[in-house]
Image: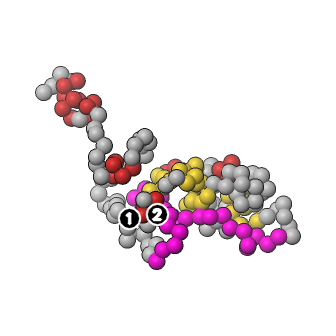
Amino acid sequence: MGNLLRRYWTPACLSMELEADGSPLEVRLLGEDLVAFRDTSGKAALFDRNCPASWCSVFYGRNEDCGLRCAYHGWKFDVTGQCVDMPSDRGRSPERIKIPSYPVYESGGIVWTYMARRSRSRRFGTSAPRISLRIRSWRSKVFWDCNWIAVARGKRRHRPYLTPASVLQRDGRR
């Protein structure tokens, strides 16, 4: 099932959660721990939580000058996951080091990601819902301890206090 869901564009976070050169955001998607951030130029990025040098979390790193710098060795990664600076290892070539990353696309106030490892089509829109900004829209982020597929298919039972009838009864109207 995990490989099937990876072949669809998946919402990773809300666009407003990421600010240029702001703090990174921890994201857990399809059983993977990831880090999202927005670089100096405004590009969003999503990649693996662990630095390939020390295996410590890059979530604790600094977001600076178009990249995320690991707090342990100081290695800096751009939005594609490519290492661009290695101050602790001047003899090594940063071009050979890359942190696993996923392509992202922003649409409708949501940062979407495509998590399939190998694919022919990565274009946004082929498997993502279309969100038009010309109509009134509302985005939210909710954490439910439940089966993701059941929620997507509308099988989750509504709580009695969320239905319109219960709101009317509570207010004394029928």
Numbered circle sitting on residue 128 = 1
Question: Does the stretch in magenta take in 36?
Answer: no
What span is in magenta? 92-120
For the C terminus, the quadrant is top left
Q: Is residue 134 left or right of residue 40?
A: left
- Give the residue drawn at x 31%, y 43%: 156
For the N terminus, the quadrant is bottom left
What residue is disc 2 on?
A: 3
Q: Nearer the viewer, mark 2 or mark 1?
A: 2
Amino acid at circle 2? Asn
- Give the residue drawn at x 61%, y 67%: 80
- Give the residue drawn at x 46%, y 77%: 120
Residue 87 horizontal/vertical position (percent) = 82, 62
Q: Residue furthest right?
A: 91
Ranked by sequence position, the earlier of labels 2 and 1 is 2
Closer to the camera, 147 or 107?
147
How many labels, in total? 2
Question: Does the stretch in magenta take in 102?
Answer: yes
Determine crowd level at label 2: few under 14, some 14-19, many 20+ residues with C-alpha closer than 10 A: few
Amino acid at circle 1? Ala
Residue 18 horizontal/vertical position (percent) = 55, 52
Q: Is residue 15 left or right of residue 26?
A: left
Numbered circle sitting on residue 97 = none
Element type where label 1 sits in the image: loop
Q: Is residue 128 left or right of residue 159?
A: right
How far, Cα to Cα, is label 2 from label 1?
16 Å
Q: Are marks 2 and 1 in contact (CB under 8 Å)?
A: no
- Give the residue drawn at x 62%, y 49%: 23
Determine crowd level at label 1: few under 14, some 14-19, many 20+ residues with C-alpha closer than 10 A: some
Residue 51 horizontal/vertical position (percent) = 70, 57
Q: Is residue 30 visible?
A: yes
Q: Residue furthest bottom?
A: 120
